Image: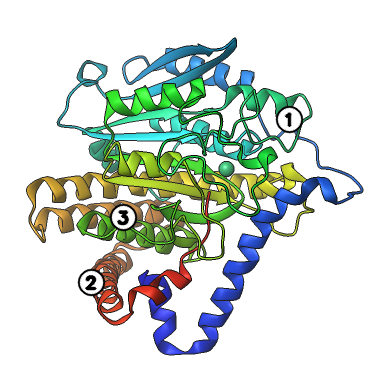
Amino acid sequence: MAFFHRRRRFTILPCLILFYTCFSIVDCRKRVSYVSHQRQPSLTPVDYDLYHTSDTLLEQIKKMVNNHQDRFHMDTFTSTNKGYKAELNVVTYCQNTNEIKDKSKIRILLSFGQHARELITSELALKILYILSEEQTLPKRNPVLLNKTLQNTIIKVVPILNVNGRKKVEAGDLCERRNGRGVDLNRNWSVDWGIKEKDYDPKEENPGTCPFSEPESQMMRNLSRSFQPHIWVNVHSGMEALFMPYDHKNTTPSGEESEKMKLMLETLNHLHFDDRCVVGSGGGSVGYVAHGTTTDYLFEVAKVPMAFTFEIYGDEKAYNNDCIKLFNPIDRPTFDRVVNEWSAAFFTMFEMGAHQMKFLEERTPFNVDNLISIDDYLKGYLIERKSRYGEKTELLEIGLQEMRTYFRLFLLSSVLLMFMFCSRIPKSSRSIMTPTTP
Ligand SMILES: [Zn+2]
């Protein structure tokens, strides 16, 4: 919210530009619904030099888990409904696998590949797992500090939620987003299930015969019940956005948890994406809200304190039915940029999540430890810069001070702006600027 409000206060022009941009993005995502009405010279195929198949991706993950059994564990669940069988692979990261059930740790649940054609999301899952395994490193991040944060964290990753749908894409059905029997797994959950908007297209958003009709959704619900995450992220592509609840209405929740979610998203947007991502409620004010989504269920019913949907990439210049190009980078530099930027953002989120949970548990308004830890993070960032660019220590110290001040100012100004926004903008106008849905 503060993101929009800052612009609103200074001049009307940037606000109009932003508004126009929102509409453009929404249009870009919605036009996929009209695929069959347009003719298209040539469609972009999946480049298997760039992307793994679902089999090779899962094979690679299994190998990695086997190589690092001290910190990884993998489960494969299966479920069948009326002859339709689905499987769910879940990788668990915990630095000491004996502590996997330790309830004092921060629990994070990440899901990728819920929509079949969004191949890039599962490549991001693979990258995050490689960084957790320490087979790959994160640029600009001190691995020692990262390790320290992750000592108290358990992360569960579902690298390909919709394996059956993904197989259909690999068989040539390049625009498939639903599961192996045509149900949209991000409309199959119980919060506001089954409501159909005017532009409802069953090829895109079929919610199934009832909430949780699909084995994939049932298995994910069981996982969320048993794991009880503090943070949930549903990773999609089609645009660049950091969404929080709600998807089924054009408002955000009220209260302290909501403020914390907003602050988390605005900080990630600022630190990693130059503020270019759309931030806010998933449910849009442009007649395009989403019903029965996973994130709304996990926030409303499973009571996950921080429930997000991240949209990591979209090509709004791609043709309407060129789905591989619409939802996925098709060249190596863009592919690498997306995967590197977003994996860095995820690790910042892990770090911030640890501080946020401490903050919530202690119920203190401001904690010195939090600042020290943020300083540690920034110190790690600058030390990494130093080794990369060979900067002198004095410059490093000055830079460190600047970064500390900047970061504190940023946090303070975000809180102030949110406060001003909430107190000065009436409810009806608040909803006008909320963006679109996953
Ligand atoms: Zn999606």
Q: Which residue matches tag 3?
A: 261
Residue type indicated by callout 2: Leu
Q: Secondary structure at mark 2?
A: helix
Residue annotated with mark 2: 412
Side of 147 relative to 42 (left or right): left
Viewer can see residue 239: yes
Q: Which mark is residue 165?
A: none
266 left or right, relative to 335: left
Q: Amino acid at mark 1?
A: Tyr
Label 1 neighbourhood size at 10 Å, few (<14), some (14-19), many (20+)?
few
| Total marks in image | 3
Q: Does any portion of residue 315 appear in the rendered image? A: no
Asked whether mark 3 lies closer than 8 Å to ligand 1, one says no
Q: Residue at x 26, y 79 (%)?
A: 420
Numbered disc 1: secondary structure: loop
- Between the residue at mark 2 and the residue at mark 3, the CA separation in whole angstroms equals 15 Å
Expressed as whole percent of the image width and height from the top left, the position of residue 287 reads 56, 61
Q: Nearer the viewer, residue 347 or 22?
A: 22
At x 43% / y 44%, what residue is drawn?
Answer: 192
Q: Pinpoint residue 358: horizontal percent, then vertical percent.
A: 15, 46
Q: Above or below — where is 9 with respect to 409?
A: below
| Badge 3 or badge 1: first in the primary sequence | 1
Is disc 2 surrounded by few (<14), some (14 to 19) or many (20+) residues within 10 Å?
A: few
At a point 23% along the width and 68% down the height, the residue shown is 408
| Image location of residue 425, percent across then percent down | 33, 80
